[in-house]
Amino acid sequence: MSATTPLAIITLAAGKGTRMKSGLHKVLHPIAGRPMIEHLLASAAELEPARSVVVAGHGREQLEAQLQSRAVIAVQDPQHGTGHAVQQAEAALAGFDGDVLILYGDVPFVSAATLRSMIERLHGADNPAVVVLGFEPADTLSYGRVIAEGDRIIKMVEHKDASEAERACRLCNSGLMAVRSADLFGLLARVTNDNSQGEFYLVDVVNIANADGRTCAVVVTPDPHEVEGINSRAELALAEHRWQKRRRKAAMDEGASLIAPETVWFAWDTKLGCDVLIEPNVFFGPGVSLADGVKNRANCHIEGAVVGEGCEVGPFARLRPGTVLGKKAKIGNFVEVKKSVLGDGAKANHLTYIGDAEVGAGANIGAGTITCNYDGYFKYKTVIGERAFIGSNSALVAPVKIGADAIVGAGSTVTRDVAAGELRIVRGEQLVKPGWADRFHDAMKKKKAEKKG
């Protein structure tokens, strides 16, 4: 691969995705919490492309909203095949002189290493006009075939147009290609739709280049799953399954303990430190980081949270976006935390909601405590000082501050600030009526007996 040759990426995403039966564009369906096209573009980004073009059709507004200025959107309307789709990128690449990778938005897991191998082959000594990424699946199904001698392509043929002998070939076309910009659009201009589908096939650029006496080459991925397309909900689920399986193994290889790996679900960006323990049935959404020595007990849902060294979370806890836990903080069973920072050693062990709060180091939040952070219109902050003790079943009505070393008595509803070192008890007067319960029971038993009589 030439370090001085600029690279452009063309990603095809114009299909309607009818088999998904969804209002969401096919390539925006998430795997591990990330739209599939973003997985692909992240791999491509490792090659530092100078330009990126996404060819869209149906649902292009959704793609524009997702990608914004990170790619030029070229529109294919009407849609007359893959060759026609790539032609729509010509205006966006006007004046570009370099290499072009042609990718597919619904083939999200091709690796950066594989993409590099295609570009490197394009710069081989035999100067190929086109490099195709091939693969050998367990079942060749209706994939197009790559007829090759060594790595030199003799012919490309779609399954519908292939002879029985050609269909016996196990080397299949992934659809991904590397071509020089100087060759690409000239070759495409010569592609015709003289085939069973009446479409302009991208693969025909190989046959045209061969007819011109030029060399075309195939690079074969060792992992056929790398180039599997996703066209249905079932295929989406299978892709998720395979991604999670790889990620779980990587987590354990990197020093995390997963008690029941098949029950743990990671996001694409989950970060785990060393000696992390993850018990069964834990789900990580995007934006989670667990430092060394964290114990994640069973049945937790965590997203957008930073969990500090030596913390313990769960069981049955939920950490929502904006949560930051300091060293050795503890979040126990049936505790929910949202957009809050807990200092080192702070604890909320049972049945508590902490939202829009700042909790000082060493503070203890009793069972059933709620930070009342929302009045129906706006959110407000609760600040709890270091070593403060909040008694069980307390309601802290924000905005409110609890000072360092303060104590809030159990069952209190706190609406005003509590000074450092202060005891605050906010309860109704306790009324005592001796003998009242006995007289009540006697009267009710008598009444019940009279009704039966």
Image: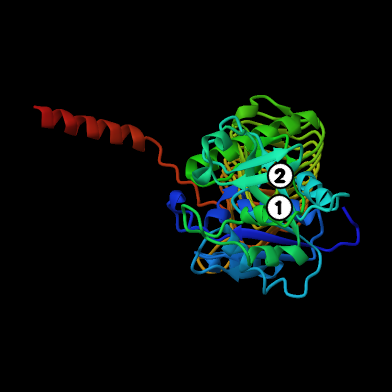
Question: Is residue 266 in view from this perspective?
Answer: no
Amino acid type of the residue that numbered disc 1 sits on in the rendered structure = Asn
Check disc 2: other Cα within 10 Å, few if <14, some if 14-19, many if 20+. Answer: many
Check disc 1: other Cα within 10 Å, few if <14, some if 14-19, many if 20+. Answer: some
Image coordinates of residue 406 in percent, x first then y, are 73, 51
Amino acid type of the residue that numbered disc 2 sits on in the rendered structure = Ile
Q: For this view, does 291 lie left or right of residue 61?
A: right
Q: Residue at x 59, y 60 (%)?
A: 83
Which residue is more in the foreground, 187 or 420?
187
Callout 1 secondary element:
helix
Q: For this view, does 30 lie left or right of residue 97?
A: left
Badge count? 2
Cα distance between the residues tagged 2 and 1? 8 Å
- Mark in the foreground, 2 or 1: 1
Quarter holding the C terminus is: top left
Identify the residue at the far top of this view. 259
Query: Which residue lies under the disc numbered 1?
Result: 210
On residue 201, the disc is none
Image coordinates of residue 264 in percent, x first then y, are 63, 33
96 w.r.t. 245: above or below: below
In primary-sequence order, the first of circles 2 and 1 is 2
Picture quarter containing residue 105? bottom right
Q: Residue at x 35, y 35 (%)?
A: 437
Q: Residue at x 50, y 52 (%)?
A: 428
Query: Which residue lies under the disc numbered 2?
Result: 153
Image coordinates of residue 407 in percent, x first then y, are 70, 48
Callout 2 secondary element:
strand
Which residue is more in the foreground, 444 or 187?
187
Question: Is residue 439 in view from this perspective?
Answer: yes
Identify the residue at the far left of this view. 453
